[in-house]
Image (cartoon, rainbow, N blue to C red):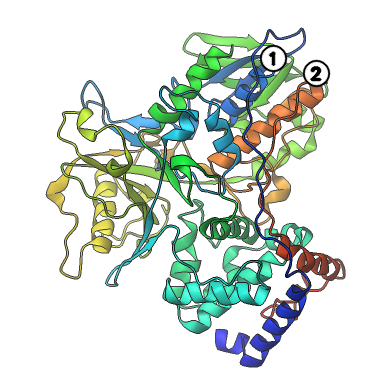
Amino acid sequence: MHDKQLPPQSRRSFFKNAAVAGAGVAALTTMGTVPGAGKGWRASAAPPGKTVAIFGAGPAGMTAAHELAERGFAVTLYEARNVLGGKTRSIYAPNSGSTPLPGEHGFRSFFGFYHNLPDTMRRIPFAGNKNGVWDNLVRLEAAMIAGVNRHNLTIPLPFPIPLPQLPMTLKAFIDSVSSVLETVWRLPAQEALFAAERLGVYVTSCDERKFGQWENITWTDFAKLNNSSKEYNRFLGDGFIKELVATKSANCSANAIGLVGESYVWSLLGINNDGGAAGEGNDRVLNGPTSEQFVNPWGDYLRSIGVKIQLEQQLSSFKTNGKHIASATVSGSGGTNAVEADYYISAIPHERFSTVLDDAMVAADPALAGARKLQNAWMVGLQYFLKSRHDLANGHVGYNDASWGLTSISEAQFWKKPLTSYGDGTVKDVLSAIISDWDTPGMFNKKTAKQCTPEEIVKETWEQIKAHVNGDGVTQLTDDMVHSTLIDTGLTGAGTPQIAYDDSIFIQNAGSWTQRPEAATGIDNLMLAGDWIKTDMNVSCMEGANEGGRRAANAVLHASGSSQGAVELHKQFKQLLWEPFKAVDAGLYRANLPNEFDIVDGGRKPH
């Protein structure tokens, strides 16, 4: 199909137009600057009328509490579980010793294009660290793309890319990306060029088109995955997407994938990365369990600046008085309790917010009804505790032929504390995997993950991983290496029709942007926080949750008339080179015409 879509004459026309349009901006710099990290604020006694109740102690709620407490508000943070961190918290294997074996809901990536979250991390004290918990980040040096019956590809990070001198024309950008896809990712030349051109269409699209057109179609449709080779799909479809966001290309909006994909490309090129010391680079992980190296120190800091933390207290309802919240109710082992505050921030997941969203609240702010239409996906962690050290790669491994959408990382190489200090002392490594496709039959047992018992999930996942890394006369993983395993404790009822997952994540389905609410609602003292509200980051991740918490804190500052400075929001990087293209595209979009470089859809109206 690509040969028909991209005849040589059309490609020459594309490049000619791109070169002409780019010539006028050749002098523009491509290097953006990021505002300096926030210095924090000293806590002070809250003035009258400045009490805040925050429900949900994941990254969003903890961020909002952090920012408001540092600005003198009296904050109480309520969490339904008995630990902080939400989906970011570590989990521990039961009955595995006095110091239980540590696991995660999934390995934690701190991408270089994150800026809001690193700013917060630098402001969380950690003994011996100059830059707080941020100094607990370790730079990854590589990523592996693994396949079945094929040579696995290990890519150094950052990997050498044949770029022209910056600034570059759009033609040079397309040529460079195409070259990378062809030489590094081994795509056929024609498909490498096609993929680069689709990216060129996205980066030259104006914001109106991104949110008015690309937001409303799937990545599958935008990237033409259904008419492409398996290799093209493997790298530009779900094989790549599952390593950035837990969703499927057939469901996720082209705008959401395009945005994070563009940010990732700039990060790979060393542009706009949060950096310095050990944490610089395209991708980073913590040097130990997330709760120990990040979440628990954060909780300690919040308490030190006056935040009251109430665990095992779940938000069950709001009581409204017109466009005003009069009170809230929380429930726990001690019964139900009324909560009264000047401002309320819901930082719980959208599916739980929907359960407390009553008709009176929707009547006060009809935009809140969209939360009921948002959808989730399962991204479940599974740890294999190993008796010996096995570094499959110095970074993440993507199992591109795995039907269950697997990724993993070998943890011990990055941790300061040896694994032998946990459990019975014989565990030396943990292969931390993620299962992100629960509806596709397994490669070996031919069952979907949702149809499997816990034992079947463990076995099938292990077999899929071994099929990718064992071969060509090399055996990296064997069954006798496994000491024990741990499935994400949020998964319940496995092997029964009642299987459920308590820690699912929000997915950015095509068209969902208009259903997502803002941090400030039509109810004057109710604010929302999380990666599921409208954020600049757009996709589900810790950075998006942190940004959502910052937006909620700013909404409280605005509503209260506070004289304290607003919380800084680090916007997504914008390549100055593309601005003239976007300006042209804005005119085309308003005239109901396609993007000028959109050869594939050149005859189709955008809306």
Pair 2/1: label in front = 1
Counting from the top left corner in percent of width and height, residue 486 is at 28, 38
Please give the label number shown on residue 410.
none
Q: Which residue has dot 1 on it? A: 72
SS label for mark 1:
loop
450 up-or-down from 325: above or below: below
Most distant residue in the left direction = 480
For label 1, the crowd category at 10 Å Cα-Cα, with few meaning under 14, some 14 to 19 and many 20 or more, is many
For label 2, the crowd category at 10 Å Cα-Cα, with few meaning under 14, some 14 to 19 and many 20 or more, is few
Please give the label number shown on residue 321.
2
Quadrant hosting residue 443 = bottom left
SS label for mark 2:
loop
Counting from the top left corner in percent of width and height, residue 151 is at 29, 71
Contact (Cβ within 8 Å) of mark 2 with mark 1: no
Instruction: Name the residue: 78% across, 59% down.
Output: 208
Upstream in sequence: badge 2 or badge 1: 1
433 up-or-down from 463: above or below: above
